[in-house]
Image (cartoon, rainbow, N blue to C red):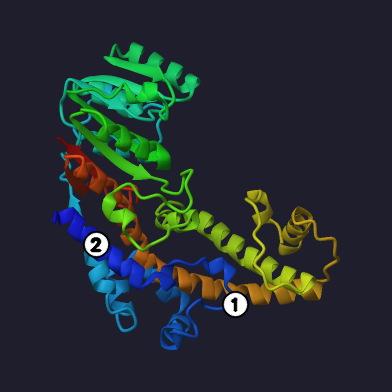
Amino acid sequence: MSVLLDRFQQIDDLLWQYQHYWQLQPFHHRHIGWKIQHPELTEALLALGDDALQAFYQQPITQLAEWLSPWLPDAPNLVSLTELTVQPLLAQTENSEEKRLSQGIPGRKWQQIQQFAQQVPKTDTLLEWCAGKGHLGRLLAFQGKGKVQSLEWQAQLCEQGQQQADHWQLPQRLIHGDAFSDDAAHLLQHNQCAVALHACGDLHNTLIQHSVHSNIESLLISPCCYHLTQDEPYQALSKAAQHSALQLSKQDLKLPLQETVTGGNRISKLRDTELHWRMAFDELQRILLQSNQYMPLPTLPKKLLTGDFSEFTTWALHNRKINQVVDKAKLEQALQAGAIRVKQVRRMELVQHIFRRPLELWLVLDRALVLEEAGFHVELSTFCDKQLSPRNILIKARR
């Protein structure tokens, strides 16, 4: 049994064993989802102050695992299974010309590109998958890593990227094409390395499947947005994952992405307001419609969050086509009930937090294992710090 397969099976067993803690949507529950089955954990969560709760997100995940261990004894082991090799980063000696390559690219994104590029070996040709304007490929060409072909679906981005490559006189060709097409599959060649930085869902899966059926030499992928797939439930790629008892919905696949590391106090306060008002509206509609079902709302205009709850409610009632008059007393009642819901949602999310990285690694291992089954030597590591991007896992495969 390979090291990757052994790790996958251990994570798979624990995710299955504890699925009732993470395979739920906290917004939909008026009470903590496991209140009856696990009253002691529920009591401990409700006794946890807001400051203490937030502190867990600022601390190493091992602290939360230790706190949960009286009720989830495998939590520390689960966390240890997600530890990956951290790729060493060379000191950035960015010259003035290389720095000019970053013009128009947000600083955080440019740092991700730089640190990903450090892991790319020199080769004859490079294929940049889902390239956008070809920022990564342009840096790789500038660094002399090889001739670059950059595949992108949007013609306008191809044109802009090619203009940049021509301006710098770099060996980079932007190709306008569909990553899902047979033509794209034919781009994969021997003596070539394919790279994909944060290609979403089916897009990076397609590159993996093309690689399995080609004679490409190597590939480096940092997966992202696992839920952006045509299939539901999730269709596993590897034999090991196909034999798993887990059934994953698109909502489950969003769980690893719910951890955010960017945004200041203002953004955080707006998120808190939005959750409170959404929960308050759900309480209100249950009263108005005598319903016991959660009522979702679509993405809302953010300017609503700078007004008051009455304006938000007017928008929500109109959006859901509920023609009822709501007095001030009902609004106050809904806000109070919504605050209670927020407290419970946040505590369910805290427990889910311990499963985010394990579920992501389960998904990444599925991708790694299908490559291993096809004869690739596969390594998993992280290419940048979590604070730079929480989607920092790197799949490095070579024949």
The residue beneath circle 2 is 9
Closer-to-camera residue (180/70): 180
Dot 1 alpha-carbon crowd within 10 angstroms: few under 14, some 14 to 19, many 20 or more: some
Amino acid type at image mark 1: Ile
Residue 266 in sight in this render = yes
The answer to whether residue 202 is above or below residue 253 is above
Residue 118 at x, y = what percent? 20, 35
Dot 2 alpha-carbon crowd within 10 angstroms: few under 14, some 14 to 19, many 20 or more: some
Element at label 1: helix
Residue 396 at x, y = what percent? 21, 41
The residue beneath circle 1 is 340
Element at label 2: helix
Q: Which mark is residue 221?
A: none
Q: Residue at x 45, y 16 (%)?
A: 159
Closer-to-camera residue (40/277): 40
Q: Residue at x 76, y 63 (%)?
A: 310
**Quarter that holds the N terminus:** bottom left
The answer to whether residue 156 is above or below residue 22 is above
Residue 359 at x, y = what percent? 35, 59
Please tell me which of labels 1 and 2 falls first in the chain.
2
Q: Nearer the viewer, mark 1 or mark 2?
A: 2
Q: CA distance from mark 1 to mark 2?
A: 38 Å
Q: Is residue 255 left or right of residue 76?
A: right
Given contact means CB atoms under 8 Å apart, are the residues at marks 1 and 2 in contact? no
Residue 60 in sight in this render = no
- Give the quadrant of residue 110: top left
The answer to whether residue 370 is above or below residue 138 is below
Amino acid type at image mark 2: Gln
Q: Residue at x 17, y 20 (%)?
A: 124
Residue 146 at x, y = what percent? 20, 21
The answer to whether residue 328 is above or below residue 47 is above
**Quarter that holds the C terminus:** top left
